[in-house]
Amino acid sequence: MSDHCGPAEPAGVAVAGRRRIALVGSPNSGKTTLFNALTGLRAKTGNYPGVTVTRYQGVAETALGPVVLEDLPGTYSLTAISPDERIVAGVLDPADDSQDTPDALILTLDATTLRRSLRLAAQVLRADLPVCVVVTFTDELTRRQGRLDLAALGRALGVPVLAVVGGRRQQLGELRELLGGPATWSRPLVPPPLDAEAVSGWVDSVLASAGYAAPELDARTRRLDAVLLHPVGGTVVFLATMFVFFQTIFTLAAPVQGLIETGFAALGDQVRASIGVDWLAGLLADGVIGGVGGVVVFLPQIALLFVLISLLEGVGYLARAAFLMDRVMARAGLEGRAFVALLSSFACAIPGIMATRTLPSTRDRIATMMGAPLMTCSARLPVYVLLIGLLVPSDARVGPIGAQGLVMFGLYLGGAVSAMLTAWLFSRLGRSAGPALPFYMEMPPYRLPSARSVLLAVYDACRGFLAKVGKIILGTTVVLWLLLNLPAPSDAELARAGVDPADSSAVASYTIDHSLAADVGRAVEPVFEPLGFDWRINVGVLASLSAREVFVATMGQVAAATNPDDPSQALADLRVQDGPRAGEPLFTAPVLAALLVFFLYALQCMSTIAVLRRESGSWRWPAIAFTYLFALAWTMALLARVVVGAVT
Amino acid sequence: MSVMSAMSLRRHAAPVLVPASVGPVEERVATLSALRCGAAGTVTGVVADDPAVAQRLVDLGFVPGTPVETVRRAPLRDPVVYRVAGYEIALRKAQADCIRIAPTA
Ligand SMILES: Nc1nc2c(ncn2[C@@H]2O[C@H](COP(=O)(O)OP(=O)(O)OP(=O)(O)O)[C@@H](O)[C@H]2O)c(=O)[nH]1
Ligand SMILES: [Mg+2]
């Protein structure tokens, strides 16, 4: 999750002059785990074939000084059929000038799938590069009563072979030693054969000389699959898990959220009391603390979301999700892996869009990219929590179930269904392109993710969230504060409007009502008027084009300026200022519903647009996505307002 | 079997066909997709219109002589999880149709 909501491309490391060693191997064979262990970095790992979809570089210390290590996507074959595999084939192909061929390769071989992995090994060993084999998962091999003689495997392959389990530090010494001097590595006397049938013979002989006994069935996986992949049982378990999760987002996170809220309120008071300069106190207390604090409050929810996501990824559920959903996705003209890409978008649309690289077909990739921004990403979470808090009282229940959690569940479901329908639509439109490409999905055994990996994923997500708050959101918030507070009214102007200059809160609301931001918000009123938005919501919606959380920050500022003592109450008390609804509460149920639905659909994320451009190769698709989603957002929001208005 | 060698040569090779006379007559040429859940067989060949698909299935371990077993069907009957070469993999019917097998009695 290190790429939380930010375009993740190869990490920039000074490569010049240093030896480069690339990691190749089958998907899910532990390349990234090894890469992280050797470089001390934290690239994303997970028990799913196809986690890494891009090149990643880092520096590893060896016995003879540092080398540049390069993590690559996994591949079953050097005959590539999808973009992530083409990256590997390109790196290994000396004729490909767009990228430098590495000086040596580390080939990871999963000991539990050795028979298949050796077919890739045969292809890799034919590349004219020094190769060192790292056998992974020997712990699991032993647990499942398999056997492998590493020294004999080394002799049979003719290259250095050693075992590293899960990147354990104490097993890295020998490898670091080796990485220092690839020139000294032994090479096979005769390269493995090319012909498929001859490769089979070669694999058989290697396995026989290495005394390989394949592992037995993983009993735990069989038992779990019997439940989780059961047509009825599996669905029930899945929905129940999601349900419990959305309940905890409100019940478990709320107390912590309350604490953070109180903390920021106290800080705001402190600042107001101790800074003499009025405008500076306003900027800091209302703008920065009110706006940024309003977003940071949602850190507990973000943390919880990422606990769930990293558990799903680490355990090995994603491959099952692809398996279960493949038939449904086939209806949409897509495949199971597209569903996993959509599922990854629960964290953020960007890793979701990047995950489409595992899809062989261009049409599938574009269709999935169009759907991904509709999945409820973590940036929508704060907006949803804020608006649901205004819409549904926290003690409201539907039977035994908290109503807030239920609404949240509905929004996630709505996003997912809309994403699938959008993918279906775009896959229909792009019908003609390309031949039918094969669908296959390796089902790795269930594995217990280490507490460390889950904690790190959550930590990285939280850090990414705070970094985003610190950069984009802080910046926009300050600009917004200026727009909301300029021009400052003169005393004469206040007197003319009948506002008492001594009444600071009256002055504040007069200033905001006549600010530059108000002009902008009013200017777009014709567009949003049918949805029931007033100029303040408009400003929030416009500002959230940079990042969705900015909406929360804007509301936080408006609230802090109106009622610094109790910002959350201030929002509920806001009134419509002009037009036919003047005087009525602003956040009525229909308006809140319209807002929620608007945020469900609209593409308000600059980073997503940038990644869409990069992954699709032109501005055409991001432009289409933005227009399509805006039109959809507006229409559906209007529908929501009308429907909810009719019901309540 | 010359089928396999033809496939591994080049992606743009002509479609590969398996000789119809593989195995005794009573063992009709069956494909993996026809295998019942829980049943096992041995791969005898891979045949696909697109050589890239055939090549990929071979790379995934569906090599002549390899035992294969049907593990589980998805709720809507497709795809199906197979056990081959010591691991489990899900294939759609279209892919399973490409894999010729001799059922184990
Ligand atoms: N038991 C065990 N688990 C391991 C070992 N090596 C890696 N893992 C786990 O296996 C899973 C896959 O590891 P990754 O490092 O993401 O594999 P990868 O080869 O980078 O996978 P892709 O990027 O999808 O190609 C992770 O959940 C790891 O924690 C090992 O030696 N033993
Ligand atoms: Mg990886």
Image: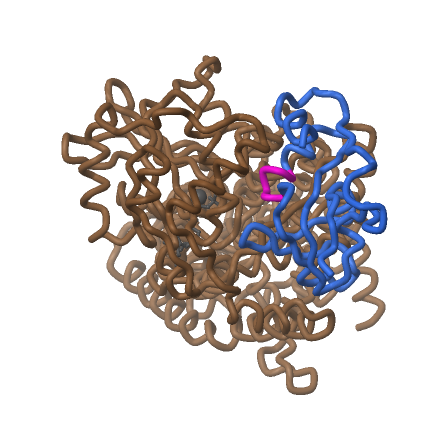
Chain colours: A brown, B blue
Whether residue A371 sits left or right of residue A171 in the image: it is right
**Image point 64% across, 32% down: which residue?**
B55
**Where does residue A257 sit, x and y in percent of width and height?**
43, 69
Query: Does residue A454 appear anywhere in the picture?
Result: no
**Image point 57% across, 45% down: which residue?**
A352
Residue A376: which quarter of the image?
bottom right
Please provide the residue range marked out in magenta: B57-62
Residue A57: which quarter of the image?
top left
- Placement of the C terminus of chain A among the 4 image quadrants: bottom right
Query: Does residue B33 appear anywhere in the picture?
Result: yes
**Where does residue A618 sit, x and y in percent of width and height?**
63, 23
Q: Is residue A440 above or below residue A310?
A: above
Question: Which of the two residues, A290 or B101, is positioned nearer the viewer here?
Answer: B101
**Image point 37% across, 58% down: which residue?**
A453
**Where does residue A128 sit, x and y in percent of width and height?**
39, 20
Question: Which of the two residues, A235 or A393, is positioned nearer the viewer here?
Answer: A235
**Image point 66% across, 23% down: which residue?**
B11
Whether residue A435 sits left or right of residue A208 in the image: it is right
Whether residue A191 sits left or right of residue A436 in the image: it is left
Whether residue A39 sits left or right of residue A372 in the image: it is left
**Where does residue A359 sit, x and y in percent of width and height?**
64, 38
Question: Which of the two residues, A588 or A146, is positioned nearer the viewer here?
Answer: A146
Q: Count all numbered tags in the image, as a single digit.
A: 0
Residue A222: which quarter of the image?
bottom right
